[in-house]
Image: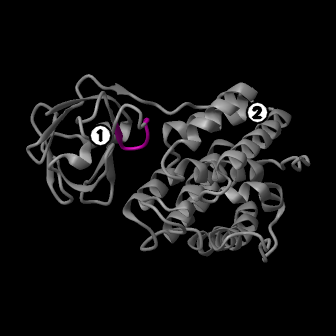
Amino acid sequence: MLLRARSLDRRARAALRRGVRFTVHSVFERALNFNDGDGAIIGLVGPNGGNGPATLVLEGLPAAGFSAARIKRGAVAEVDDAGRLLIARDLIVDPSMAELWLPPRIQVEVEPERVRANVDQAARLAYALRGGDGLGGLLACLHPLVTGPAAEPPARLSPLLRAAWSGLAELIPAWRAGDAAAVGPAAGRLVGLGPGQTPSGDDLLAGLMVVSDRMGARQVVPLRAACLESAAGRTTDLGLARLRYAAEGDLDERSELALAALLRGGPAEVEAATRELLAFGHSSGLDILVGILLGIGLAQPLIPPRDG
């Protein structure tokens, strides 16, 4: 079966060199991931999967999805002389007509009052829609988290949220102070936290790292490096890949658009981008949003949420 790629990012384009061999890392209904042997993960997703680091977006999927195809974990994939990806002799992916996806970059000056209003709107919407999933419950505590969480979390939080709170209680002061030596151990309490192929704590850290970079936080490079170093041996391959890309300043398209809306958009744009991000994965979009909102809050103080 021949599948054509609609778009790909710079990492995926660089990875598809003639003669390169990959192994199938994981197979899902609408996604297929490869390992290049050096720890990098290359992903194939359907047309609704969205662009992202090291990702090819296909024009269409196999009729019954990848999970029904005869492709197993560990199968070999190879790039042929024509630049096509041959997967276990069952699928051929042709990237020759794919457009290069570039993440949006924010060029305008940030207006603090607008950003604060946007953050408040997104946090309220996300909590109302998904407050019971992933790390969404932290959105009700966004302001106290940013201003300096107490060591003891609120009693009403679930065990997962209590663990995340405790990690953030150490991470946020260290991050604000630019103390990479303290950031590493604190981030280690969040890495691998929660279920899923990309655990909730990894998603939160990814959002935090990229926002801090976009908003010009001081000493962000060593802080990101400390987060990534803390992840070794603590999380899944996909979680580690997400953290590695975030440490280099890259997120998926939905997250990038949500960040752009939060920093420069109006209410309608913020709502649309927030809803779109919340639909990403089981709770990945939600957890990345929590990290994004925390990152914005650390870059500039947030207005306390209104009652009601």
Q: Is residue 233 above or below residue 257?
A: below
Does 53 appear in magenta? yes
Three-letter amino acid code at disc 1?
Ala
Name the chief secondary structure element in magenta: loop
State which region is magenta: 50-56
- Residue 135 location in percent, x, y? 63, 59
Q: Is residue 46 left or right of residue 163?
A: left
User: Residue 201: x, y in percent?
Assistant: 57, 63
Q: Is residue 111 visible in this depiction of the protein? A: yes
Out of 28 and 33, give the one closest to the viewer.
Answer: 28
Q: Is residue 217 at least partly visible in the picture?
A: no
Q: Residues within 10 Å of mark 1 (few under 14, many from 20)?
A: few
Q: Amino acid at mark 2?
A: Val
* Residue 277 position by quadrant: top right
**Residue at far top of view:** 97
First-in-chain label (2 vs 1): 1
Q: Is residue 125 above or below residue 108?
A: below
Q: Along the horizontal axis of the image, is 282 left or right of 20?
A: right
Local crowd size for mark 2, using a 10 Å CA cut-off: few (<14), some (14–19), many (≥20): few
Residue at 77%, 50% (x, y): give it.
Answer: 297
Q: Position of residue 19 (x, y in %)?
A: 12, 44
Is there CB contact under 8 Å for labels 2 and 1?
A: no
Pointer 1 residue: 14
Q: Nearer the viewer, residue 85 or 110?
A: 85
Mark 1: which secondary structure? helix
Residue at (67, 45) in percent of width and height: 129
Residue holding disc 2: 110
Here the colouring is one colour
Judged from the image, the secondary structure of the residue bearing numbered disc 2 is loop
